[in-house]
Amino acid sequence: MAGVEDRVVVVTGAGNGLGREYALLLARGGAKVVVNDLGGARDGSGSDSAVADIVVEEIREAGGQAVANYDTVATEEGAAAIIETALTAFGAVHGVVNNAGILRDKAFHKLDAAEWDLVTRVHLAGGFHVTRQAWPHLREQGFGRIVVATSTSGLYGNFGQANYGAAKSGLVGLVNTLAIEGARHGILANAVAPIAATRMTQDVATAEVLAELPAAHVAPVVGYLMSEECSDSGTVVVAGGGQVHRVQYFQSKGFSFTETPSIDEIAANWSRITDMDAAVPGVNPVG
Ligand code: NAI
């Protein structure tokens, strides 16, 4: 694969599903891969170092370079140890794929604070911690690639996934700012909302539908975003089943009030405010 040769890439949650495919593809392209995985269950319980070891073994048997790491992404200490693994084994870190994730789905009226905390800690805080630990190294070398795993559940919402969707949407917010702050340092940050048959989706669709959604279809998109070929930053894509789409916020033409409007004036102009016919991509007016 063009553009990842000899790059040191950390893939979190690379022991299963999508992360495993990302790690295998990047290693086939000549990247040196840190295969991070806590080896827990889908709900985040438990741990098993064999999960990362098996993927490292697979990569080495195919002639690639990889090292395992078993720390959690969800704490500063865990994230520091993950990046330290890259530095110790390969002497550098050039990119991070923030892919590790768990599920604790509940309808919002049943969702408790512990389930909120656990899910946001792994996805959102995990994305922050691992990226934050890599960031000084990326800045210093003037090159870096960050990919976060977002989700259509975060971009569009999904019943029973308030905790997960909020965390996944939060990662897009993180990427929006990393793209701005990384620009001067050759660091690109992008988000992929994958759609793939893994243990995470095994009970949300029929076997026929899942058969059309191999994780391997998503991997080249992540591979491209991690490569030197890529020049995009702050881009969000949805990828699955051989289809890849860009997702972007648009802002309506809106309506300008010359004086502070009343609630009634807002109501009277609501259809003009929300009319998306002449919408343009949104930009931060104070950025
Ligand atoms: P998966 O359950 O097969 O893989 C996730 C991996 O993350 C597991 O190996 C798990 O052990 C690891 N992990 C969990 N918590 C961890 C922690 N604290 N530290 C380190 N590793 C940890 O799931 P899948 O489907 O491969 O998901 C990968 C990513 O893609 C996740 O972030 C998920 O939310 C996201 N995603 C997946 C979709 C799909 O269609 N499969 C849809 C949208 C998003």
Image (tube, rainbow, N blue to C red):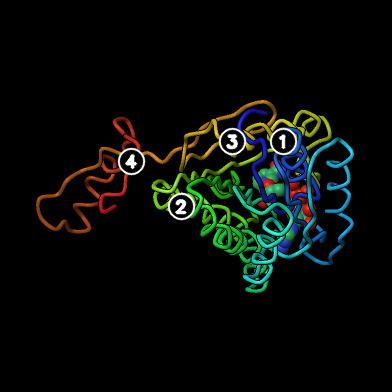
Residue pointed to by mark 3: 227
Residue pointed to by mark 1: 30
The amino acid type found where label 1 is placed reads Gly
Sequence-first disc among 4 and 3: 3
The amino acid type found where label 4 is placed reads Gln
User: SS class of the residue under badge 4?
Assistant: strand
Residue pointed to by mark 2: 178
User: Cα distance, mark 4 to mark 3?
Assistant: 31 Å
Find residue 241 and report its horizontal and vertical position in percent: 70, 29
Contact, mark 2 vs mark 3 (Cβ under 8 Å):
no
Is residue 110 visible to the viewer in this orientation of the structure?
A: no
Sequence-first disc among 2 and 3: 2
Measured along the vertical axis of the image, is residue 47 above or below residue 190?
below
Assess disc 1: are there few (<14), some (14-19) or many (≥20) residues with their C-alpha within 10 Å of its C-alpha: some
The amino acid type found where label 3 is placed reads Ser
Q: Give the foreground label among 1 and 2.
A: 1
User: SS class of the residue under badge 1?
Assistant: loop
Q: In the visual, does 12 lie left or right of 206?
A: left
Which residue ends up furthest to the front in the rendered image?
Answer: 91
Contact, mark 3 vs mark 1 (Cβ under 8 Å):
no
Find residue 279 and report its horizontal and vertical position in percent: 32, 34
Residue pointed to by mark 4: 251
User: Cα distance, mark 1 to mark 2?
Assistant: 26 Å
Q: In which quadrant of the rendered view does residue 32 lie?
A: top right
Query: Foreground: 254 or 244?
Result: 244
